[in-house]
Amino acid sequence: MKKIEVLGTGCYKCIQLEALINEVLVELGQTNVDIQRLTDERYIRKFMPIEEVPGLVIDGRLVSNNIVPSREELRKWLSSN
């Protein structure tokens, strides 16, 4: 089972990233994925500066920050993990 964490404070980019993740997972047919949106600033700072939200952590590894990745990039990351 994959564990996906969206790190952010609830800004537009954070919400957009979470929606895109859900869309790509449906496309990939992956239903056993745990997705969490984490807003705790102390937790976010373990991975990156708070100013660089949104962050995307897949299975404990930061794969992107400060951007909403393209659908293709996201598909690649979610397929390979």
Image (cartoon, rainbow, N blue to C red):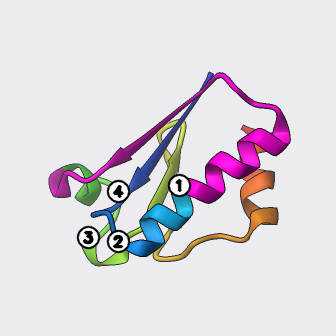
Instruction: Kindly give the residue lying farthest to the left in the view shown.
Output: 42
Q: Name the mark on residue 18.
A: 1
Residue 44 is left or right of residue 71, and the answer is left
Tell whether label 1 touches label 3 (CB within 8 Å). no
- Give the amino acid type for the residue marked by disc 2 in the picture: Cys
Q: Position of residue 16 (x, y in %)?
A: 53, 66
Pointer 4: residues within 10 angstroms few (<14), some, or many (20+)?
A: some
Location of the C terminus (image quadrant): top right
Location of the N terminus (image quadrant): top right
Residue 26 is left or right of residue 1, and the answer is right
Q: Tell me which residue sits at (70%, 26%) in the image.
A: 31
- 4 or 2: tag closer to the N-terminus: 2
C-alpha span from label 3 to label 4: 9 Å
The residue that mark 3 highlights is 50
Please name which of the two marks, 1 or 4, marks the residue nearer to the observer.
1
Q: Is residue 63 visible?
A: no
Please name which of the two marks, 3 or 1, marks the residue nearer to the observer.
1
